[in-house]
Image (tube, helix red, strand yellow):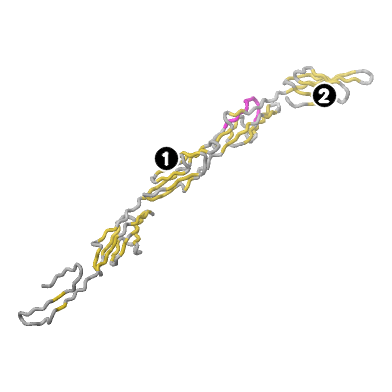
Amino acid sequence: MGSQASLSHAVSGGIYSISNTAVAAIGQTSGAITPVAPGTALVTYTYSNAFGCSNSVQTNITVNPTPTASATPSGATTFCQGGSVAISAPAALQTTYLWSNGSTQQNITATTSGAYNVVMTNSFGCSATSNTVNVSVNALPNTTVYPGAAVTICSGTTVTLSTSTAAAYQWSTGANTPTITVSNAGSYTATLTGSNGCTATTAPIVVTVNQTPLAQISSSGSTAICQGNSVTLTANSGAGYTYLWNTGATTPSISASSSGAYSVVVTNNGCSATSSATNITINPVPSAAITASGPLSFCDGGTVTLTAPAGNNYTYSWSN
């Protein structure tokens, strides 16, 4: 039902009539049939010749039912990426379905944007096209994280974590800012909300905190030494530690024999610390000489005065 048909006869000029106008209407002279409702009707064609003699012929027509095609969504047709909506057509016996996405099932699930309709065809070969259901799928926010999915920092330092631009942010720490600054080891995520209301959560950003080594210098003795002597300076040790003294040495210990400030950079697992400076003072060695006041050979009862050089804070220890 729904499409028109036409009857014709070899003898023209006759009149068409139909027995049941509830089934179909027919053009009296054209023979054009317009279906009205499913059913059967008798069509009569009556014609006359020039002598006034008339005749008629009859034929039965059948109007087959057309399916009632509709497409009904199960819910909202605008949703976020990853969502879906079921669209159903009415059940009908001996009916085939052809959806605009190529599916031949009675019902489909739409996960992408588009216009969806269905053509239903029954066993009589009659077809009907449903209404169109427009589906809109909104994109999720971009969940790229910076500086990356895995970050390593040293104790006592911080790192700033950020994501792509969004309308709103909710970090696993409770912060709702575009970026956060952290100093503790852990796994951090952010839930982003786009301007379209869609949300997405980033992959975890795993922050690892390596311990920064302690950098200290100990000396084997006084750091004020006499010229010509030396003192051993030693940095604190640890498994995997490397050293760089300001003298250029890369050993745990160095021997200092010159005045100056000595420091060392201690590194472990990529984390470095610089020690406080240890100041070495070199004291000059006094000139030890003896001056006699007279001859060193003299008679019993005589004397000679022996004199050592004078100097600030000098102390003396004679062999006698």
Residue at 92% over, 21% down: 49
Quadrant containing the C terminus is bottom left
Front residue of this view, candidates 98 and 193:
193
Q: Which residue is mark 1?
A: 173
Q: Amino acid at mark 1?
A: Thr
The answer to whether residue 83 is visible is yes
Q: Is residue 29 left or right of residue 231?
A: right
Residue 70 on image: x %, y %: 64, 27
Residue 246 on image: x %, y %: 35, 62
Disc 2 is placed on an element classified as: loop
Q: Are marks 1 and 2 in contact (CB under 8 Å)?
A: no
Residue 3 on image: x %, y %: 75, 27
The answer to whether residue 200 is visible is no
Residue 232 on image: x %, y %: 27, 63
Front residue of this view, candidates 63 and 302:
302
Q: Is residue 86 magenta?
A: yes
Along the polypeptide, which appears first: circle 1 or circle 2? 2
Q: Is residue 10 above or below residue 222?
A: above
Gap between marks 1 and 2 measured at Cα: 81 Å
Quadrant containing the N terminus is top right
Q: Amino acid at mark 2?
A: Gly
Q: Which residue is mark 2?
A: 31
Label 2, residues with CA under 10 Å away: few <14, some 14-19, many ≥20: many
The residues colored magenta run: 85-97
For marks 1 and 2, give the one nearer the viewer: 1
Label 1, residues with CA under 10 Å away: few <14, some 14-19, many ≥20: few
Q: Is residue 297 magenta?
A: no
Where on the picture, by quarter, is residue 12? Answer: top right
Q: Is residue 193 above or below residue 33?
A: below
